[in-house]
Amino acid sequence: MPPRRTRLQKCLELLVEHQGPLTGGPPRDPWAAILWENVVYLTDEQRRDEAFLALERATSLRPDRLLEATDDALLGICGKGKMAASQVQKLRDCARLFLEIGDPRTLVTLPESRAMTALQEFPGIGRPGAERLLLFAGHGTALALESNGLRTLQRLGYGDDLGDYGKSYRATQGAAAEELDADGKARIDAYLRLRRHGQQQCRKKPVCDSCPLQKHCDARRGDGMNH
């Protein structure tokens, strides 16, 4: 007799039916993923992907070419907004760290604690980001989450918003991880599907009426509106 599916596994199966095959999202390559995170400030995914492709065309993602590129060239990629200069500096910082502490594609192969510490030296990479880099590179199995997936899981009833992002993240991650096998491929798919659901439906102001997870959602059952 096959093992009984958990509630979270059922939710993910519903998201597969609702979303179909997924495309896009963070690159699997750790170095490319770090640059993808830093190339532009908060923006939609299409704009981020376009900027990343422009960066790749201009520099081949080589740290030496990133350091040699002019500010004007990088500003044209990062955008002309007020945060563009900050993103240019972050890209240069990424390149310097690559040369000083190592290629992230090598860093992910270190023992986990050392890898986590080294990866978090890069701009924009906190603990959740480092967990994702390891998971996507095939060197970790932690249930990595970002803000959209975290919000979705909390509304479903996994963990709580404790008023501190780190504590909330760990509580939600731990509760959800108990219902998923420690399989890298399954956890990558969970990351991507929860993230997409949080972007498209379980937004800050959720679109509940057409949500495929309605019957499993604690927030929906609680008040029918936002949580």
Image (cartoon, rainbow, N blue to C red):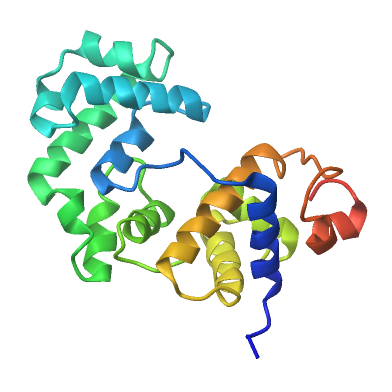
Residue at the image point whose x is 73% and y is 61% from the top: 156
Q: Nearer the viewer, residue 146 or 8?
A: 8
Q: Quadrant of the N terminus?
A: bottom right
Q: Nearer the viewer, residue 223 or 199?
A: 199
The answer to whether one can see residue 145 in this image is: no
Residue 201 location (% of width, % of height): 72, 41
Relative to 132, 156 lies left or right: right
Image quadrant assignment for residue 128: bottom left
Image quadrant assignment for residue 19: top right
In this rendering, is residue 220 above or below 207?
Answer: below
Relative to 199, 212 lies left or right: right
In this rendering, is residue 113 above or below 104?
Answer: below
Residue 113 location (% of width, % of height): 27, 69
Residue 28 location (% of width, % of height): 33, 48
Give the farthest residue toward the front: 1
Q: Nearer the viewer, residue 227 or 19?
A: 19
Residue 205 location (% of width, % of height): 76, 38
Residue at the image point whose x is 73% and y is 56% from the top: 155
The answer to whether one can see residue 89 in this image is: yes
Residue at the image point whose x is 60% and y is 65% from the top: 172
In this rendering, is residue 83 above or below 126?
Answer: above
Give the farthest residue toward the bottom: 1
Relative to 1, 43 lies left or right: left
In this rendering, is residue 91 above or below 101?
Answer: above
Residue at the image point whose x is 60% and y is 75% from the top: 179
Mark count: 0
